[in-house]
């Protein structure tokens, strides 16, 4: 009999704190904030052994597995470099942009749809919310 892996959708409030700390440590490693597992574990207050024990067992729902495809809708300020800035966010989070469709700016903003493979979607969305030229960024589809 084969081992069957079951996945569950659980509200973050029901997840034990140790799992959330493992997620935070993983994010620190991915973003470059932490140079090593030791640094990441120390920063979030867990041991390295706890990190290694749980690192492959918990992931944010929006984190794509390799090969996953996500479509995004963005509303950008009509400003030189706005699209370039958004694309840089995707690059920094390990996403491979596959398509881009930008519309002509109207009333000071331009809508963009794009699709990307891979990357940390949570981090992309969070980073985009901190850029003034990105007025809106949302996931519109996932495969």
Image (tube, rainbow, N blue to C red):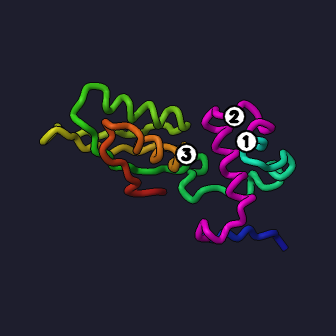
Q: Is residue 115 left or right of residue 29?
A: left
Q: Say whether disc 2 or disc 1 marks the residue closer to the N-terminus.
A: 2
The one nearer the camera, 19 or 99, is 19
SS assignment for the magenta stretch, majority: helix
Q: Say whether disc 1 or disc 3 marks the residue closer to the N-terminus.
A: 1
Give coordinates of residue 85: x percent, y percent: 38, 30
Q: Which residue is labeled 2 in the image?
A: 34
Alpha carbons under labels 2 and 3: distance apart: 16 Å
**Given this view, does label 2 or label 3 mark the residue nearer the observer?**
2
Q: Is residue 99 left or right of residue 11?
A: left
Callouts 2 and 1 close, C-beta under 8 Å = yes
Give coordinates of residue 95: x percent, y percent: 51, 39
Q: Residue at x 47, y 37 (%)?
A: 90
Label 3 residue SS: loop
Label 1 residue SS: helix
Give coordinates of residue 68: x percent, y percent: 54, 50
The N terminus: image quadrant: bottom right
Q: How many residues crowd mark 3 within 10 Å: few (<14), some (14–19), many (20+)?
A: many
Q: Which residue is labeled 1 in the image?
A: 43
Give coordinates of residue 20: x percent, y percent: 68, 57
Q: Residue at x 56, y 51 (%)?
A: 64
- Answer whether residue 125 is magenta in the image: no
Q: Residue at x 80, y 50 (%)?
A: 46
Magenta residues, as a range?
10-39
Alpha carbons under labels 2 and 1: distance apart: 8 Å
Alpha carbons under labels 1 and 3: distance apart: 21 Å
Q: Which residue is labeled 3 in the image?
A: 120
């Amino acid at each position: 009999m084969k081992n069957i892996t079951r996945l569950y959708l659980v509200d973050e409030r029901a997840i034990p704190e140790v799992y959330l700390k493992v997620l935070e440590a993983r994010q620190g490693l991915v973003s470059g904030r932490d140079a090593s597992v030791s640094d990441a574990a120390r920063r979030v207050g867990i041991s390295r052994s706890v990190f290694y024990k749980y690192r492959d067992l918990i992931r944010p729902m929006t984190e794509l597995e390799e090969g996953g495809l996500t479509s995004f809708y963005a509303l950008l300020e009509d400003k030189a470099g706005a699209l370039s800035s958004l694309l840089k966010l995707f690059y920094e989070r390990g996403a491979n942009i596959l398509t881009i469709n930008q519309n002509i700016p109207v009333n000071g903003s331009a809508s963009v749809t794009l699709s990307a493979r891979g990357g940390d979607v949570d981090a992309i969305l969070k980073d985009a919310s901190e850029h003034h030229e990105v007025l809106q960024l949302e996931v519109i589809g996932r495969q």
